[in-house]
Structures are given as structure tokens and as C-alpha cells.
Amino acid sequence: MKGQIDKITDSEVLFEQEFKINGGDFINAGESSSKLKNILKEIGINTDIIRRLAIAAYEAEVNVVTYARHGIMRILIYPEKILLTIEDEGPGIGDIDQAMQPGYSTATEEIREMGFGAGMGLPNMKKNADIFNISSIVDKGTKLEITMNLNDKNA
Amino acid sequence: MTGKKIKLSKVIEQFNLKIECGEQFLDKEIKGGYVSDLLSDVIANCKEGYIWITLQGHPNIVAVAVLKEACGIVIINNRQPEEETIKKAKKEKVPIMTSSLTAFELVGKLYELGISG
């Protein structure tokens, strides 16, 4: 894995960790994002980047729990950027443009009553990421890529 | 925010909040407040040290409070946290209080005391 990424980005991975996310596990949803946040704090990443990445990670984690069977959240830290990927096996998203619309959600009434499924997840991720990529195959799964630049002068 | 520091313990006493868990962490300063029942909204807008007012009582509110580093959660309108919520909150050291007030009434009182958003 590390070798492949190095070839693509031509850059050294300083830190790498994976978190497993189980579909339907609302009790533990968000714990991986909290662990991730603590890791970034320990490393000493800029607090604004941590804040934005934690928002994106939580939303992505909750999406896996809400819609998919299971998923992997992976953090890769490079000298110049942080790459967070969330890959799940699940129903996928047929119309990504529609899914990106704030307020659009396919969540059930039960999920909405818990305060999830407001249709803000994907827009929140995009808003907080420096670069946001989403790809999906129906009946296979969804992959999200969230990139944070570490060398911005304003960061 | 005004200059004076307001602690969780003061708000609990003044507004007769019932402590469900986290008695040992009530010395925390309340840096502000946020009220919402939509978790995406809380994740996006609640800030560190804020008191979070909600009607949700399911276990995931603890994960949200931990991630946002909220100083505590108040569940309003006589709603009760689930057993699993309390279990998680104890583990994560998140104080949870309950109130018979509505969100509107409680937020009004907190605001009057000098806690803002």
C-alpha cells in the first residue's frame, strides 16, 4: 500500500493508520473520528486543519454506519498534505450531483429522528476539505478522498 | 462573551438541572453554548468548551460531544438519555444533565446569565 502511494505521489508517507467502520453500528459511530483527532493533536497538526478534518471524518464515518455494510477510513500524512480516504462496501450512490445537494438525503424516518440524515454530510465534507473527491459504483460502494494542504501560508 | 467565567456547576445549581453522569467534571468553564438536534449541524458549528442543548438522548450524542470537546450536554424537555448513552458518557468523561425546561426556555436563561453562542 505504502509503496503504491509513494509511486503515485512521489512523496514520503510520514504516518499511516486505518480504522474499520461497521455498518449499522450507531453506538460507536464517531469513535474512529475522535481517535483520528487525538492522533492529529499529538502529532501537532494545525488546529484549524484538525477541526475541519474532524468534521469531514465524522460525517464520512456516520455515512458508512448509516448506509454501508462496512468501510475503512485511512489517514495518510505526507510532508505537504493529509489524505483521508473512506472506502465502503455498500449500495453506492447513483446520482452524486443530487447527493451533494444540501438537504438531500435518502435516510429513513427513524434515522432522521436520531438527528442524522439531514442531508448535510457530503456538503459539510466538501466545505471543510481543501480537495474533495467522491466516486461511487451502485451496489458496490463509495470512495471519498479528503485532502488537507499543510503548507498553506494561511493555515 | 463577558469577562466572567461561568462554570457548569453554577448553571446546574441555578437552573435546577439534574446530573445524570459526570459529577466529577462539573468544574469546567462554559465557553459558550449551542442548541441543535441535527448532529451534522452540531458537528459543523458547536465549539470547544460549549454547552450543548439537545433533545437527543441516544448514545451517539456522546461521540459528537467528545469530537467537539463540548463541556457538557443538557437534554431538555424531560427527555431521558438511554442507558447506553450514560455508559458511554461515563467512559468518555462527558457530563450529561437533564432539564424539564424546553430548549427555548433554557437557552434564554443561559443567555441571560452571560453565555452566548
Image (spheres, coloured by chain):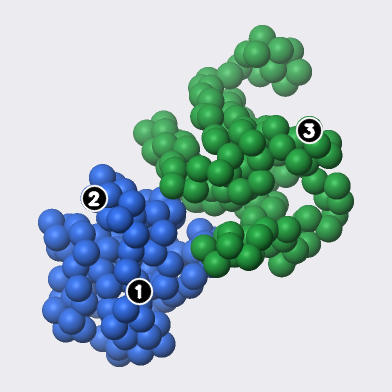
Residue B2 image position (x, y, % from top left): 29, 80
| Residue B47, picture quadrant | bottom left
Kindly identify which chain the residue marked by label 3 belongs to.
Answer: A
| Residue B41, picture quadrant | bottom right
The letter of the green chain is A
Q: Which mark is residue B97?
A: none
Mark 1 → mark 2, Cα distance in angstroms:
19 Å
Which residue is painted at 85% across and 54% down in the image? A97
Circles 3 and 2 in contact, beta carbons < 8 Å: no
Q: Colour of chain B?
A: blue
Question: According to the image, label 1 marks what residue?
Answer: B79
**Residue A153 appears left or right of B45:** right
Q: Could you say whether the residue bearing mark 3 is in a helix, strand or loop? A: loop
Question: According to the image, label 2 marks what residue?
Answer: B90
Q: Quick one: label 3, few (<14), some, or many (20+) residues within 10 Å?
A: few
Kindly identify which chain the residue marked by label 1 belongs to.
Answer: B
Q: Could you say whether the residue bearing mark 2 is in a helix, strand or loop? A: helix
Mark 3 → mark 2, Cα distance in angstroms:
38 Å
Which residue is painted at 71% across and 67% down in the image? A103
The reply to whether residue B117 is visible in this rendering is yes
Which residue is painted at 72% across and 44% down in the image? A132
Which residue is painted at 22% across and 64% down in the image? B20
Amino acid type at circle 2 is: Lys
Q: Earlier in the sequence, mark 1 or mark 2?
A: 1
| Residue B97, picture quadrant | bottom left
* Of the two numbered discs 1 and 2 in the rendering, the one whose residue sits closer to the viewer: 1
Front-lying residue, B32 or A96: A96
Question: According to the image, label 3 marks what residue?
Answer: A140
Mark 3 → mark 1, Cα distance in angstroms:
40 Å
Amino acid type at circle 1 is: Arg
Front-lying residue, A22 or A33: A22
